[in-house]
Image: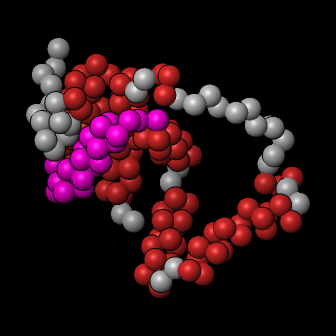
Amino acid sequence: MNPINTRTLVLAGWILLALAGTVDAQQAAPAAAAPSNLEWSTLTPADREALLEPIRERWERATPEQRQSMLDRARFWASLSPEQKRMARTGADRYRQANQDQRGRLRAVWQNMQALPPAQREEMRKTWEGLTPQQRRAWLEAGGPGVAPPPKSE
């Protein structure tokens, strides 16, 4: 994937983080405490195989186009920096915690951003970075990037 897609992913992470304030804290499931010693290198070959088996099964059922898409996503993920991966995971967590209305707004913002020309997307990203969390939240509530104009700077 090209750098514009990476920027879009990062922007989506920021958008998802901004919506975090609109997600009711009671909706978030408490995180289960996971053992801290479960590093990949400490897993047995049987455990590693058990973890990979669902992916292998999905691969075997996939069409050639789906397999290519899976491979493209894996390569894209591998190309991300640790910070970009962290932001993507945080955004995905926020999305899972969002209610149906919030998810719909997130999808709409994502689709609107994808439809913009690269230069305009970059301009939106820079505008977004210059806003306070409250301004970002207000922009999203008004429709978000690509729909509503950004809020006025204070």
| Left or right, residue 21 beside residue 109 | right
Q: What segment carries the magenta color?
A: 97-120
Residue 86, can we see it? yes
Residue 67 location in percent, x, y? 50, 78
Q: How many numbered markers are drawn?
A: 0
Q: Quadrant of the N terminus?
A: bottom left
| Left or right, residue 26 beside residue 151 | right
Where is 144 relative to 2, above or below? above
Residue 32 colored magenta?
no
| Left or right, residue 131 beside residue 24 | left
Residue 125, can we see it? no
Question: Magenta stretch: dominant SS?
Answer: helix
Where is 107 relative to 78, above or below? above
Where is 85 relative to 23, above or below? below
Q: Residue at x 32, y 36 (%)?
A: 102
Q: Quadrant of the C terminus?
A: top left
Where is 109 relative to 67, above or below? above
Residue 153 location in percent, x, y? 16, 20
Q: Residue at x 39, y 54 (%)?
A: 6
Residue 88 location in percent, x, y? 47, 45
Q: Residue at x 25, y 37 (%)?
A: 126
Q: Residue furthest bottom?
A: 64
Residue 32 location in percent, x, y? 70, 33
